[in-house]
Image (cartoon, rainbow, N blue to C red):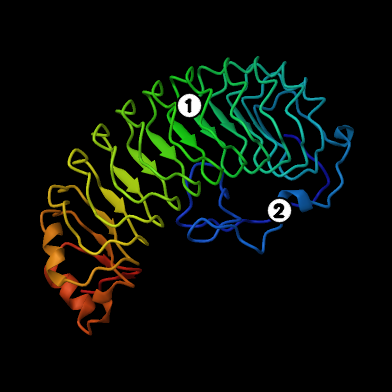
Amino acid sequence: MASMSVGEPQAMEVDRKGESEESGDDEVKRRSLNGELDPQQPPLSEKEESPVDMDTITLDPEEEDVDLVHCRIGKIEGLEVLQKAKTLSLRQNLIKRIENLDSLVSLRELDLYDNQIRRLENLETLTQLHVLDVSFNILRKVEALDRLAGLKKLFLLHNKISRIENLDHLTNLEMLELGSNRIRVIENLDTLSSLTSLFLGTNKITQLQNLEGLHNLSVLSIQSNRITKMEGLGSLVNLKELYLSHNGIEVLEGLESNKKLTTLDIAANRIKKIENIGHLTELQEFWMNDNQIENWADLDELQNAKHLETVYLERNPLQKDPQYRRKIMLALPSVRQIDATFIRF
């Protein structure tokens, strides 16, 4: 195992409403509940640590899982001895460029989370790579992934990427995380037929579109964008989790084909009525807090969801009713959690 005489990395708090739970253990460390940046966390450009010389780091040629987290590494070099390495974690360092990885042809996972990398490059020889995480860097473009046809998970959370592009050849990709970037349009995803999870939260997207080719998608998260209409979801017949909170949606609609939904999160929108979801019989979680629901009769729309366990309705006009919790329990007897509180029997 690689070692160095530096302090252990600080434990990070994970936000329950983060984009994807698999993008590292702390991928939302700088974000608050609605996806905005945490002002308590300094931007990457404010790092004051000085890089160390790689000669001070001891590398084990026999190690398969190489952990070089928070070692103040400034340049990737001297890793040629790691011929047996399957995973390499270089997260939370001071790396500015992806380089000198050509010999690590056995790598399955490469973690460059939280560095100062400006460009995707020099990855051509890593053809066995299954997981690539370059989240929390300074990337402006998705590029140079042409040879990584076996890639299954790609994490590019919190960069400065403005377009979804150059992913056509990643036909084995199962998870794509592009949250907290500068994307305005959902596009160029047609060939990603293996994709099961797509995360686009905290961007500048105004329309749900160009999702027709994603027949295997089971998780779609587009929280904290600028969407005003629920549309373009008709082909996502295998969708199980849909997250659309913190947008500008006014009508609950467009889910006629999404009969497998188990989680529907449309919190913090402008919806006045619970409607058009009576056919979602598989629902287990329904997040409708911070909307404009005021009619108790609307809950009838959820009566066919016999497995519904969690309902969030707080900060709607309904909550002003003194019998708020009791009325929800009577209308939806299968529910075990109302807002953040479990029901006591």
Q: Is residue 253 left or right of residue 65?
A: left
Local packing at callout 1 (Cα closer than 10 Å; few below 14, some 14-19, many 20+) is some
For the C terminus, the image quarter is bottom left
The residue at 66%/24% (across/down) is 85
Residue 221 pos. (x, y %): 40, 45
Residue 332 at least partly seen: no
Marks 2, 1: nearer the viewer: 2
Relative height, residue 75 to residue 221 (above, below): above
State how many labels appear: 2
Kindly identify which residue carries mark 2. 43
In terms of secondary structure, where does tag 2 sit?
loop
The residue at 77%/25% (across/down) is 79
Amino acid type at image mark 1: Lys
Q: Are marks 2 and 1 in contact (CB under 8 Å)?
A: no
Relative height, residue 139 to residue 151 (above, below): below
Relative height, residue 272 to residue 145 (above, below): below
Residue 33 pos. (x, y %): 49, 61
Q: Is residue 243 left or right of residue 305?
A: right
Residue 66 pos. (x, y %): 68, 32
Q: Is residue 327 left or right of residue 220?
A: left
Disc on res. 287: none
The Cα atoms of the two marked residues, 2 and 1, are separated by 29 Å
Nearest the viewer among 287 and 309 is 287
The residue at 55%/46% (across/down) is 180
Nearest the viewer among 326 and 208 is 208
Local packing at callout 2 (Cα closer than 10 Å; few below 14, some 14-19, many 20+) is few
Residue 286 at least partly seen: yes
The image quadrant of residue 51 is top right
Nearest the viewer among 312 and 273 is 273
In terms of secondary structure, where does tag 1 sit?
loop
Disc on res. 152: 1
